[in-house]
Image (cartoon, helix red, strand yellow):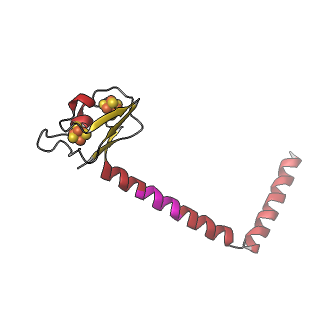
Amino acid sequence: MTYTITNNCIACDRCLPQCPTKAISVKGQTYQIDSNLCNGCVGFYSVPQCQAVCPTNNGCVRRLSAIASSEDYWESWFNTYNHLVTRISKTKPDPYWQKWFNTYSQELKKVIVSR
Ligand code: SF4
Ligand code: SF4
């Protein structure tokens, strides 16, 4: 199981020396995990050490597969949203409700003006 570091990382440097496979590297202030080297600490520790020592409450060390599935979720959500907006914008307004709304707003305006 491969892990990754997200942009919530605060560059505290705690994870770097803990990785048993030397999968973590740093470029400037950016920490990253080499997915070819990370094995989730299997065979070394019972929990991923980078996640265990990270002070951000696992906010920046995540399983790669979990990130991929949450991206799938939002991609699907936006596709559905865009599809519905396109459908609604192509729908002609119902004349009944348009008339109802016009009448209602005019009556409401009269009430407000008379106060
Ligand atoms: S899960 Fe383990 S092997 Fe993978 S980057 Fe973190 S400390 Fe290294
Ligand atoms: S322990 Fe967490 S916050 Fe600190 S450098 Fe590693 S990933 Fe970033």
Nearest to the observer: residue 86 or residue 96: 86
The answer to if 17 sits in the magenta stretch is: no
List x then y, in percent, for residue 82.
Answer: 57, 63
At 29% across and 43% down in the image, what residue appears?
Answer: 34
| Quarter residue 11 falls in | top left
Q: Is residue 115 above or below residue 31?
A: below
Q: Percent position (x, y) of residue 111?
A: 84, 52
- Give whichever of 47, 99 is nearer the camera: 47
State the residue lying farthest toward the left: 43
Q: Which quadrant does the C terminus fall into?
A: top right
Compared across the picture, whether 30 is left or right of 41 comes to right
- Which quadrant of the figure has residue 88? bottom right
Residue 56: in sight, yes or no?
no
- Residue 75 within the segment the image draws in magenta: yes
Which residue corresponds to the image point at 76% horizontal and 64% vertical from the top-left?
101
36 is higher (above) or lower (below) than 87: above
In terms of image quarters, where does ligand 1 lie? top left
For the residue pair 46 and 106, the one nearer the viewer reads as 46
The magenta span reads 72-80
80 sits left or right of 30 in the view: right
- Expressed as whole percent of the image width and height from the top left, the position of residue 107 reads 83, 58
| Residue sitting at x 34%, y 38% | 32
**Residue 95 at x, y percent in the picture:** 76, 74
Q: Is residue 30 above or below residue 101?
A: above
Q: Please report the residue visible at 46 percent of the width from the left and 62 percent of the height from the top.
A: 76
Characterize the magenta stretch by its predominant secondary structure: helix
- Whether residue 33 is situated above or below residue 106 in the rendered picture: above
